Image: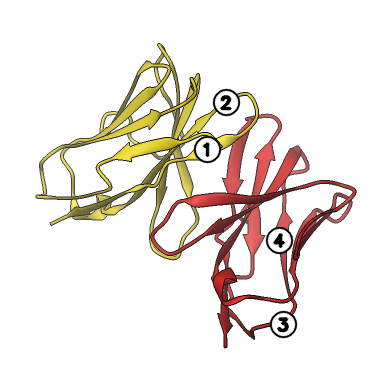
Chain colours: A yellow, B red
Amino acid sequence: GAVVSQHPSWVICKSGTSVKIECRSLDFQATTMFWYRQFPKQSLMLMATSNEGSKATYEQGVEKDKFLINHASLTLSTLTVTSAHPEDSSFYICSARDHYEQYFGPGTRLTVT
Amino acid sequence: RKEVEQDPGPFNVPEGATVAFNCTYSNSASQSFFWYRQDCRKEPKLLMSVYSSGNEDGRFTAQLNRASQYISLLIRDSKLSDSATYLCVVNNLNTDKLIFGTGTRLQVFP
């Protein structure tokens, strides 16, 4: 099946700093990528949908100026958590869709101290 | 009310047991239905799609009841390796987005 990679797999940062997470579709072109966040014992919550070459569409309650998404090519989307706070600590998962299915990356565990 | 609801469990069952999970969804515009499996600290992985006619994949059987808006997953002859969280997922036709339930945790013991 199709492969989606994420980097880094885990990151620890200090409060107030910014963190960038990369999501790549390795063997297919993804016109649409999704970013999810999952807190412990909770479901995956969609944060935003990004389409190559256009601005991301954010879900209600997600601050677009805090979570910057760039989908520069058909195989790469990035999520930047700006001015991170401890409450941003979570498991961030990206997903890429081809014509048939949605594939998930392995996730990035972010801890903000 | 959550759009997709599941009993969080945990379901603790012995090896070889049969276990069933149910899930209800509230949006009648939901068009596609899936069961995903998620291991601890890992990404969700597609277990199977769910069709109106019901479908089976080895020890796993999924059923969809559109009238009652519920989905089920039956696991027969449980293995230790089946221990995971099972996520019920629906695709909203209007938004074309996947909506995840909180998951049902299964623990199979020897």
**Residues at marks 1 and 3, CA–CA distance in whole angstroms:** 31 Å
Disc 1 sits on a residue from what chain? A
Which label was assigned to residue B23? 4
From this view, report whether residue B89 is shown above or below residue B84: above
Q: Do labels 2 and 3 share a chain?
A: no
Question: What amino acid is at disc 1?
Answer: Tyr
Disc 4 sits on a residue from what chain? B
Identify the residue position indicated by label 3 in the image: B17
Residue placed at 26% from the left, 50% from the top?
Answer: A88
Say which quarter of the image contains residue B57.
bottom right
Marks 4 and 3, the one that precedes in the sequence: 3
Which label was assigned to residue A53? none
Question: Foreground: A6 or A18?
Answer: A6
**Residues at marks 2 and 3, CA–CA distance in whole angstroms:** 37 Å
> Which class describes the residues within 10 Å of circle 4: few (<14), some (14-19), or many (20+)?
many
Callout 3: helix, strand or loop?
Answer: loop
Q: Are marks 4 and 3 on the same chain?
A: yes
Q: In this view, does A36 lie to the left or right of A15?
A: right
Question: What amino acid is at disc 4?
Answer: Cys
**Residues at marks 4 and 3, CA–CA distance in whole angstroms:** 20 Å
Which label was assigned to residue A98? 2
Question: What amino acid is at disc 3?
Answer: Ala
From this view, report whether residue A20 is shown above or below residue A44: above
Callout 4: helix, strand or loop?
Answer: strand
Q: Are marks 4 and 3 in contact (CB under 8 Å)?
A: no
Q: In this view, does B43 lie to the left or right of B71?
A: left
Question: What amino acid is at disc 2?
Answer: Asp
Which label was assigned to residue A103? 1
